[in-house]
């Protein structure tokens, strides 16, 4: 059975990560408070940021920028998804299933 967490990003109980995804205190905080689904959302967001800004992950400034963005994505003031949000492609209430 999957470990469940109260996800700070999605606002509900969901399966958690198998292990901290990042070193240190931030990695533990993510492990304790972020679901696998929200982590997968972050990975897609990180790719967008890397491509948009042309970041090199070998650059310490780029690493710092991504860490700050990750922390804000999960724990920033506007981090929680809007109430009633559903992932793209998820059936909406009353919509016909394909």
Image (cartoon, rainbow, N blue to C red):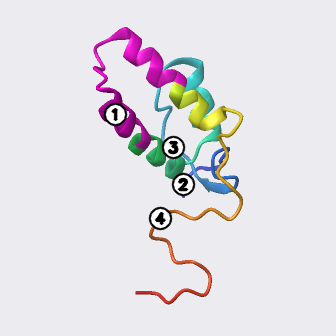
- The numbered dot on residue 17 is 3
Q: Residue at x 44, y 70 (%)?
A: 89
The crowding category of the residue bearing disc 2, from other C-alpha atoms within 10 Å (few below 14, some 14 to 19, many at least 20), is: few
Comparing labels 1 and 3, the label whose residue is closer to the camera:
1
Nearer to us in this view, 95 or 42: 95
- For this view, does 67 lie left or right of residue 49? right
| Residue corresponding to mark 1 | 52
Tell me the quarter of the picture where residue 62 sits: top left
Going from N to C along the chain, the mark reached first, 2 or 4, is 2
Specify few, some or many for label 1: CA neighbours under 10 Å numbering under 14, 14-19, or 20 or more.
Answer: few
Quadrant hosting residue 77: top right
Question: Residue 2 has which mark?
Answer: 2
Numbered range of the magenta stretch? 45-68
Dot in front, 2 or 3: 3
Give the structural element (helix, strand or loop) at label 1.
Answer: helix
Closer to the camera: disc 2 or disc 1? 1
Task: Find residue 4 and report its horizontal and vertical position in percent.
Answer: 62, 52
């Amino acid at each position: 059975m999957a470990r469940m967490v109260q996800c700070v990003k999605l606002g509900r109980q969901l399966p958690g990560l198998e292990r901290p995804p990042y070193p240190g205190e931030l990695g533990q905080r993510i492990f304790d408070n972020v679901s696998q689904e929200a982590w997968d959302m972050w990975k897609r967001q990180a790719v967008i940021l890397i491509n948009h800004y042309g970041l090199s992950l070998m650059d310490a400034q780029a690493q710092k920028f991504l860490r700050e963005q990750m922390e804000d994505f999960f724990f920033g003031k506007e981090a929680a998804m809007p109430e009633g949000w559903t992932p793209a492609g998820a059936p909406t209430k009353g919509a016909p299933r394909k």
